Image (tube, rainbow, N blue to C red):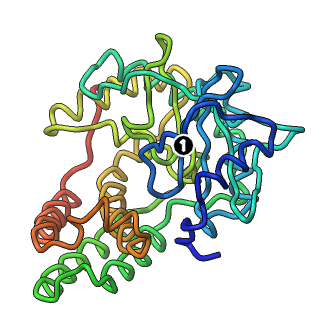
Amino acid sequence: MSDFSYQNLTPDLILDAIESIGIYPESGLLPLNSYENRVYQFRSDDAKRYVAKFYRPNRWSDEQIKEEHAFSFELADSEVPVVSPITRDGESLFEHQGYRFALFPSVGGRQFEMDSLDQLEVLGRYIGRLHSVAKQYDFTHRPSINTDSYLTQASQDILNSECLPHSLQLAFSTVLEQVVKKTEEKFVVNDTIRLHGDCHAGNILWSQEQLMIVDLDDCRQGPAIQDLWMMLNGDRQNQVLQLDTLLGGYEEFSDLDMAQLQLIEPLRAMRMIHYMGWLAKRWQDPAFPRNFSWFATDKYWEQQILALKEQLAALDEPALTVYP
């Protein structure tokens, strides 16, 4: 089954898959905002709401998905508020006609507000609690955050993409090469832990007056700062205040090696390049040209040339520091 073989994932197949584990949808299937996987919300005949996730074929192995699920169960058992999949006879990963899927309880809530220092301090505590569990042992099957996949492979996918305009190839490839080289020099990691891996505002909800962490699909082994830096925004002064607030909550439960603050800009560069590589790699999936049409425009690539130049400069700036 190819990476893009969702064409056989019909509504009837989805319903049959869900019913195969003894849950019977009463409402229609509401597609949720996910492109890597296919995700649907529905209400069952017992009035409970669920989210069904159908995993992209050939992206993760069964062992990697099960390790993600086990991590979520471990966190939930330690009272870290994460959304874990439901189980049937001790299993959380199911298969139907070649498609692997999992079901989760549907969690409503309002989106996390990055500009609220009060919410940032609460989030810091939650991530600290998550990391205190995560440090107990390492992943066996999940990948790590590394320069090969985030920079080398992603760069190849970008430069081979039909979406990169010929007229901009030289300018783009030149600055891309410079950012990759500088990032590889600066991404020196001495200690890694299990991570959420994609801890941005869209994966954090206020639910029933507490924060709820969702979507461990990108959990990986990597430096602890990865789960913190995406909460920082604005100018340097604002980022220092936000970081100090986050760490004030975080360090109630877990210690952070302050040398990892030097990894923030390399990680930002890696995320930028990895995201472009992801779009390029998935372009043959019909959902991507339909929803990311701007990826094939000259304007987008001109903006990325500028963004990479700015990031190249940021890589040479002193690392953020927190208040003594």
Residue at point 50% right, 44% down? 224
Q: In this view, does 80 lie to the left or right of 265?
A: right
Query: Where residue 11 appears, x then y in whole percent?
Result: 59, 52
The local secondary structure at tag 1 comes to strand
Q: In this view, does 134 lie to the left or right of 264?
A: right
Q: Is residue 106 left or right of residue 75?
A: left
Give the residue type at disc 1.
Tyr
Query: Where residue 294 appears, x then y in whole percent?
Result: 20, 64
Residue at point 50% right, 30% down? 127
Q: In which quarter of the image is the N terminus?
A: bottom right
Q: Is residue 231 above or below residue 118?
A: below
Residue holding disc 1: 40
**Residue 282 vs residue 179, the one in the foreground:** 282
Residue at point 62% right, 42% down? 52
Q: Is residue 75 above or below residue 154?
A: above
Q: In this view, does 128 lie above or below 192?
A: above
Seen as rendered, the residue at the extreme top is: 209
